[in-house]
Structure formats: C-alpha cells, structure tokens
Amino acid sequence: MRTWIFSLGQRVDRVAEHAVYDELINRAVYAEELGYDGLFLAEHHFSNYSAIPYPLMLLAAASQRTERIRLGTAVVLLPLYNPMRLAEDVATLDNLSDGRAEVVVGRGYAALEFRGLDVDKSNSDSLMEEGLDILTKAWGQEEMDYQGKNWTIPTVTVIPRPFKETPPLWWAVGSKSSMASALDRDLNVICASAPGIKPGGHVDTTEAPHVDRMYSMYAQECSTRGIDPTGRRFGAQFAAHVSSDPSEVDRALAAAVWNHKLAGRLITDRQRIDRGFVDMSDTSDADLIDNVPRQVLDDHWMICDPQTFEKKVEKYREMGVTDLSLNVGFGGMDDAAVRRSMELIANVLQLRELV
C-alpha cells in the first residue's frame, strides 16, 4: 500500500498565502524524510477552504526540494481547464520532477468555482469526458487532433512530452457513473470518506463510510467487465490525525468537523463570503454535523490513537485499497501537531523501512 500526504492548503485565520505555501512545501520535504510515497495537493478557488487554485505550480516548486516522492493533484478540476494547456503543464511538471507526476482529475462540485471562472457547471460531464479524451491523445500520440462538442484542435504536437511515459491518470469517483467511466477508460480510481452531505445540507448518519461503499461498487463494476480488481490501483482518502493524547485527538476531531461544515456550504452552494473567507458565524447548520454521533465520525475518519489507526489501515489494506491518501492539516491544526501525527503514522506503518 502506498501512503500519500494530502493537503488542502487551508486558511482558517487570515494568514498570508505565501506562509501557507511555505508550510506545504516544507511538509513535502518532511514527508519524504519520513518515507511517505507521495504528496497530493487539492485545487479550489475563491475561498479560504483552500489557497491552492493551481496545484501544479506548487507541485513544481516541491519538485525542486524533493527527490523521491510522487507529486500529484487531488484533484485537478478538469472541466475548468483548457485540456491542451493542462496536458502541457502536467508534462512540464513531469520533466521537472524526473517523471514523478501523477494526475487525479475530478469534475468538481462547488458552483462558486464554476461561476467565478465563467464555466457552465451543467456542462461539466461533457467537459470531463472530452478533457480526458484530449489528455490521453496529447500524451499518447506524437501528433494529435480533436473534434468534439466543446473543443476543436488542429493537428499539433504537445511539447514538452512526458518525461519517459504517460503520467499515471486517476479519476476521483463519487458515483456509479463516474466509476464505470473510469474503468472503461482503464484509469486508476480514488475516493474520499466523510459523512455524506445531502442536497439540503443534512448529514446522513446511516450510510457506511464512503470508501467502503465505493470499493464494493468498484468490485461489482470490475466483475461485470471481467476485470481483476486487484490488478489496478484503488485509492482512498481520509481526514487523518494520529496521537496518543486524547485531548489532541479531540482537537483534531473538532477541526475536521469545522472543515466538514465549510465544505458542506460549498457543496450545497450556501456559502456567504467576505473577501475570500466563508462566513462561519451563521449557526443555522450547527445541528447538521455538530450533533452527529462520535461513532459515525470515527467510522468515516482516521482521527484516533495509533492502535486504532493501525487497525483501520489494515482493514482497508485487506479490502484492496492500494493507495492511502491522508488529509492532514485541516481546520487550522497547527504545524507542530501535524508533524507529530505524520511521524507517528510513519512509525506505525514503518514507512522508512519500506523506502
């Protein structure tokens, strides 16, 4: 199982963006020292949920401070891009990092981000499918052209070419249709686990963890296609903080709840934003997750003591998860605590010995 650190680049307080970036790049260096396999960076726009509008730029900077770890987007919001420009940018990162680039693409969910970039969200499925067509052709063919509903491209050669081979391409799946499309395209898949947010903003406390449900769907979809599910990569992402101090676990859990409420406002398009910061003073949604039973949160996240963490990881290893993405540094958790957790996770999983 490969182990990745994932970062949102979140701004809880009005800290300068450059400080967020310095912390992320230093965290990438530390992750490499600890034996982690890779770094995933998010992409979000126009709010303090994430200060990373274009993760490839930060990954390029991290490539110059690291030598071994993989460098990936999780996710790059494909419908918001000219796919030819994205193909060039990813290939540039791949060359700068000597072939360490990986790309997770996703359709996106925040209407705010589509509006701000003047993209029709209702067309995101079509933009996603055509974007994947173009990326595949741009990297796989020395010369390519394309004619589609959204894009018309004359015969061109994308320069630079990927470092040695096509960077691994993933689809962040959240539904049966996206899972099916990813498998039909022979792409890796990844999903994230968190209590489900319904259209009205309510939290579903009855559902099994999202990763569990998506892996079951993955196995079924593989079976219908005659595919061995163990023969490809399936990634799972969890909010994670590991500590032997119960008070620190509680603090991390509170930070994850805060982060979940902020994400929920973006997902349901109920955000009120003041100069880039989502207004969290409105308590009308306080009951949506604040009163969710602790056991439900524990089932969805990896915010726990080392022994419980080890059992959770083993569960997903046995399930068939090949890549574990651990979301750290959410909700204003201080860097010292995040680094302690990263080191403890590395020790539990014996990551240094696996390098």
Image: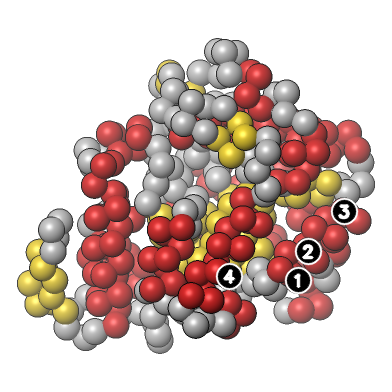
Instruction: Classify 10 Å Cα crowding around label 2: few (below 14), some (14-19), many (20 and above).
Output: few
Quote the CA–CA distance across marks 2 and 3: 11 Å
Along the polypeptide, which appears first: circle 2 or circle 3? 3
Q: Is residue 141 left or right of residue 296?
A: left
Q: Position of residue 290 (x, y in %)?
A: 70, 24
Quote the CA–CA distance across marks 1 and 3: 16 Å
Quote the CA–CA distance across marks 1 and 4: 13 Å
Residue bearing the label numbered 2: 315
Regarding residue 283, the answer to whether it shows in the image is yes
- Is there CB contact under 8 Å for labels 1 and 2? yes
- Residue in view at x 75 percent, y 71 percent: 318
Which of these two is toward me, 329 or 180? 180
Residue bearing the label numbered 1: 318
Which of these two is toward me, 225 or 115? 225
Instruction: Give the amino acid at mark 1.
Output: Glu
Disc number lying in front (3 or 4): 4
Q: Position of residue 240 (x, y in %)?
A: 72, 49
Along the polypeptide, which appears first: circle 1 or circle 4? 4
- Is there CB contact under 8 Å for labels 4 and 2? no
**Element type at mark 3:** helix
Disc number lying in front (2 or 3): 2
Which of these two is toward me, 219 or 108? 219
Q: Is residue 62 left or right of residue 204?
A: left
Instruction: Give the amino acid at mark 2.
Output: Lys
Along the polypeptide, which appears first: circle 4 or circle 2? 4
Residue bearing the label numbered 3: 308
Instruction: Classify 10 Å Cα crowding around label 4: few (below 14), some (14-19), many (20 and above).
Output: some
- Is there CB contact under 8 Å for labels 3 and 4? no
Residue 199's disc number: none
Residue bearing the label numbered 4: 219
Regarding residue 332, the answer to whether it shows in the image is no
